[in-house]
Image (spheres, rainbow, N blue to C red):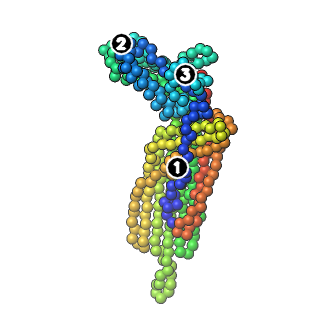
Amino acid sequence: MPTGQFAAALLAPILAPAQNDCKTVCPEQIVASLSNLAPSLPKAEVEDLRAAVEQEVNTYARQMPGWKCVCKIHEGKGFKCGEFPLKLTVQKTGDAIDAYLTGTQGEAWTAVVSSQVMINTQSLADLASLKQAAVSAVEQTLSKVHPCGAWSGTINYVIDVTAPDINEQMRNYTGHGHYETTVFLNRGIAGVTRSANVKSDLVLRQRARAGGATTIIQSGTDKIEGSANGSSPATVDVPIRRDSGTYQIVPSWLEAAAGSLHRVTCDRENCTTHDENFDADQVRQMAIVGKLEDPNHLHGTKTEQTSIMRDSINGAQTLTITWDLTKSSSDTH
């Protein structure tokens, strides 16, 4: 039996991450302030500029690692959900647009990080140029901090596909498949490496008559060998549900890890060779669910085994998942 059949993709439910809940996930909130940015522009254009800055912040907070706990931009002086409110100020200083982030330490605002984007004098009264410079300065500033803290560590998935060696009168078979996926995080920035190797060797025999006697001859062979490797950026969501005392770890990535599979099939003396693409991504997205004991250290291991059978050959597919993630403190307070 070809190993390629044994090494089929593991089918498993993909658990959706918990929705961001300001009250239960994290108390962060952020305010945007525009200062002396466009005093000569009409009020409607100033509001357009403010909306562009707020959209950049909200988009960043929803999508980027280390920003998932920021609930939303909040207008006004009150903080409905903010033990540690943040303030983003965007202002014009000479021929530059500055964006700097501050956080509260008690009653005082403390500077965290800032960025500056230069803009030529002729563009200072141009809404499109101001908007582009302001959004760029905001993006540069937000990229330097992790207000929710940041996760570091590894998540490892190993799939082993095995079948016992068969040495019978009418057939011989050996084969195995090994798939390994490692997701690694360094202060919220994630990547993934994948590797896969499969190999099998099947020899079939049949009875035949020769010189009036019955004998056994080799009737066919099927040999498969393949490998694949790849690495790419990844994202990892880690929603914490304090109300239920559970957490999820949900890694995902887009790029495939491709390789090649070489197969030689012989029917008596007639052989055909076939090469095809081989994918190492047997685990493209697999959520981990655990019991919350320490919200800053998530770790564990689990093993799942599935029995499989093809062409009267019994095999097993074993998935082992190991994870160890540690959360660093916030960069803002």
Q: Is residue 152 above or below residue 304?
A: above
What residue is pinned by disc 1? 283
Q: CA distance from mark 1 to mark 2?
A: 55 Å
Q: Residue at x 49, y 61 (%)?
A: 5
Q: Residue at x 49, y 77 (%)?
A: 206
Q: Is residue 264 above or below residue 103?
A: below
Q: Position of residue 135 (x, y in %)?
A: 41, 24
Looking at the image, tell me whether mark 2 or mark 3 is earlier in sequence order.
2
**Seen in the image, is 75 located left or right of residue 120?**
right
Regarding residue 199, the answer to whether it shows in the image is no
Q: Amino acid at mark 3?
A: Leu
The label on residue 40 is: 2
Looking at the image, tell me whether mark 1 or mark 2 is earlier in sequence order.
2
Q: Quadrant of residue 314?
A: bottom right
Regarding residue 333, the answer to whether it shows in the image is yes
| Front of the two marks 3 and 1 | 3
